[in-house]
Amino acid sequence: MGLEHSRALLEVGASVVLLDTNSDKLDLAKATLESEYPKNRIRVSLSDITSETAMSNLLSQLNSAGILLSILINNAGINPKYDEVSKSGMKSRVENFELADWENQLRIGLTGAFICSKVFGGAMANSQGGVIVNIASDLSVIAPNQQLYEKGDLQAGEQPVKPITYSVIKTGLIGLTRYLATYWHNDGVRVNALSPGGVYDGQEDEFVTKLNSLIPLGRMAKVDEYHSAIQFLCSDASAYMTGQNLVIDGGRSIW
Ligand SMILES: NC(=O)c1ccc[n+]([C@@H]2O[C@H](COP(=O)([O-])OP(=O)(O)OC[C@H]3O[C@@H](n4cnc5c(N)ncnc54)[C@H](O)[C@@H]3O)[C@@H](O)[C@H]2O)c1
């Protein structure tokens, strides 16, 4: 989705800096965007959002190049596999969930968003103001329906589940959003969350059919259906909005 959020901003004239730890994905995103938009508006940085030092160094590099940031989108995350089996059983189940996985996933999804907010949001608060958008999920407002993840004829206690970390991270991002919105309310930094529903990306038919039946609009999101929401949240169109969670999920969370 980072590619799509970049497209949304490039479409309306912004310049973007994409960060990722995966160099292949970053190279592909750069090449794709450069074929669609002016090259001088696209930068990439192979860097880890969980390193405060790396984020501070990146901020210094950008400032040295005369670039002042006015938008931060906290989008990175990991969508952990839910059907892996370890010696103790189905890894995603709470009783088997490994502490190392809990800590690693929270570090990327929540601590990473905190570090980027601290470094880049802090710089915006100190200078010209700006906006932060935290990418949460419909699972920031509802619990996962574990029936979506059930497999074959496994016993109830052995079924895979959506990992608990996903709900904790996405709900935590809403707390981060509210906290920072009030913390920086006098410094010209607005902070909102966007909670997308599931985006169709070739998932298994059985999963898609089950999920579609839980969504009033009857389908998953198309990959480009969040462009206008990103443009709204990142521009003065949302000048009177801070601390909110914009839920765009085909209505799933109202059923
Ligand atoms: N795709 C969906 O259906 C959907 C729905 C709701 C919410 N979301 C949220 O949107 C965001 C993007 O989702 P996606 O589907 O594009 O996921 P994705 O896994 O395709 O992309 C996430 C990116 O984050 C990068 N990343 C991981 N750890 C990092 C780190 N420490 N530093 C820098 N980059 C790191 C990964 O390399 C990856 O490229 C996630 O926060 C996800 O939870 C996605």
Image (spheres, rainbow, N blue to C red):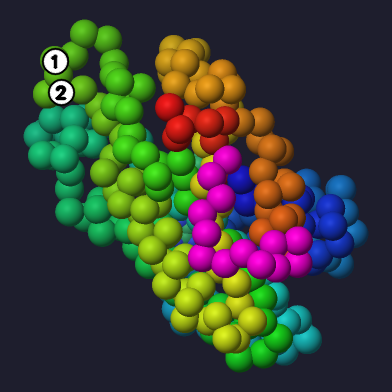
Q: Which mark is residue 155?
A: 1
User: Please, is residue 99 above or below residue 87 in the view?
Assistant: below
Residue 224 percent across, percent down from the top left:
71, 38
Q: Is residue 220 left or right of residue 63?
A: left
From where the camera sits, is residue 199 visible? yes
Please check the rendered image and state whether residue 84 is part of the magenta-colored stretch, yes or no.
no
Cα distance in 3D space between marks 1 and 2? 5 Å
- Kind of residue sitting beneath label 2: Glu
C-beta proximity under 8 Å, tags 1 and 2 = yes
Quadrant that contains the C terminus: top left
Q: Nearer the viewer, residue 25 or 243?
A: 243
Residue 254 percent across, percent down from the top left:
45, 33
Tell me what residue is drawn at x 46 percent, y 41 percent: 138
- Determine the image quadrant of residue 152: top left
Q: Which mark is residue 213?
A: none
Quadrant that contains the N terminus: top right
Tell me what residue is drawn at x 72 percent, y 56 percent: 232
Residue 66 percent across, percent down from the top left:
78, 86
- Determine the image quadrant of residue 176: bottom left
Tell me what residue is drawn at x 66 percent, y 67 percent: 240
Residue at the far top: name it. 153
Residue span colored magenta: 236-248
Residue 53 percent across, percent down from the top left:
46, 82
From where the camera sits, is residue 201 visible? no
Q: Which mark is residue 158?
A: 2
User: Please, is residue 121 above or below residue 101 in the view?
Assistant: below
